[in-house]
Amino acid sequence: MTATLMDGVAVSKSIRAQWKERADVLKLQGLTPGLAVVLVGDNAASQVYVRNKVKACGEMGLHSELHQFPANVSEQVVLARIAELNASPKIHGILVQLPLPPQIDNTRVLEAISVEKDADGFHLYNLGALVTGGTVFPPCTPYGVMALLDYYRIPIEGCNAVVIGRSNIVGKPMALMLLARSATVSICTSKTRDLRQYTSIADILVVATGKPKMVTGAMIKPGAVVVDVGINRMPDGKLAGDVDFDSAKEKASYITPVPGGVGPMTITMLLANTVQAAERFAAKSLNMRKDQSGTGREAAALQK
């Protein structure tokens, strides 16, 4: 058996087309969804990710801004810029590219972003709301994984789902999203004893460890759906995931490639969150105008 590739590039194009239609509706109303990206330092990988995000915005006709700072910038300067972006009517989504340099507190910076503009879904409000299923903006990578599973009509309810990795960015929200869809979920960490005991029963296996080729085909249940979130630069310059693709594809029913799997989906869901934020802004503005109009009519009636 050779697994079916879950093509993140092709699925992204399909999903982006749907969200572009929604963005175009807003533009007809005079509102162009806008995303601001804050980049600190000159990390090469971060610069590539940011370029891809800005390029994707342009392809969808969204407004985008890049706010770049040197690596030695103070936390206060970054917080001040985020405050400006929170107040800007042109910006509906704000993303701070991680990692940040050591003099900046990641949590403080991410918490400074308005909940209504948290396009990356990293604010404590949005992460915490995943517990009740009421998050405004889901974190983009697990959101993209769920979109991939749904696109390929992979059953989630009642399945055994195993997530390897417990980060706030991928592992924890991924587990909560799967749990919300009635999967039986296990989270494995670097301290998990006998990892194979868990991976061998997983109907859906999501791997996000940052360790290249950590999961091999011998560890996978025949017919499992394998989602590889990792992307690692190998000594020969090639990219590899956290799953040994060559051996895993012979055991899995579906598998994501690296690159071209989860990566494009992450950017796509960032765009989706930005458009949704703009829609919420438009709806809120409309309601405010209605309220003001109603107040004006009431005042006029009292004067008669």
Image: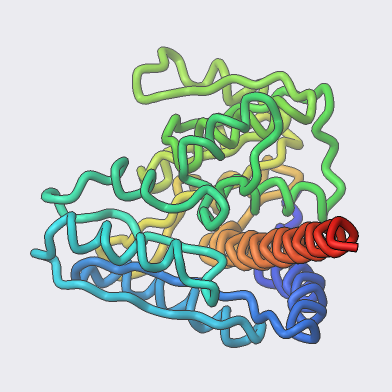
Measuring from the top left, give residue 77's x and y in whole percent. Answer: 19, 63
Q: Pick the residue in front: 131 or 152.
A: 131
Q: Residue at x 62, y 48 (%)?
A: 137
Q: Is residue 258 above or below residue 156?
A: below
Q: At which x and y percent is residue 274?
A: 61, 65
* Res. 8 in view: no
Please give the name of the residue rendered at 41% of the width and 13% of the height, measured from the top-left corner: 193
In the rendered image, the quadrant that contains the C terminus is: bottom right
| Display colour scheme | rainbow
The residue nearer to you, when weighing 98 against 67, is: 67
Tell me, yes or no, if residue 231 can be seen here.
Answer: yes
Q: Quadrant of residue 206?
A: top right
Q: Quadrant of residue 296?
A: bottom right
The spot of residue 58 in percent (x, y) is 57, 86
Residue at the (51%, 31%) spot, across then down: 172
Please say if 125 is above or below 54. above
Residue at the farthest top position: 193
Image point 59% across, 20% down: which residue? 186
In-front residue for pair 263/134: 134
Position of 43 with respect to 304 (left or right) is left
Horizontal placement of 217 versus 102: left or right? right
Q: Is residue 277 above or below residue 167?
A: below
Q: Residue furthest left?
A: 72
Q: Say which of 234 and 164 sits in front.
A: 164
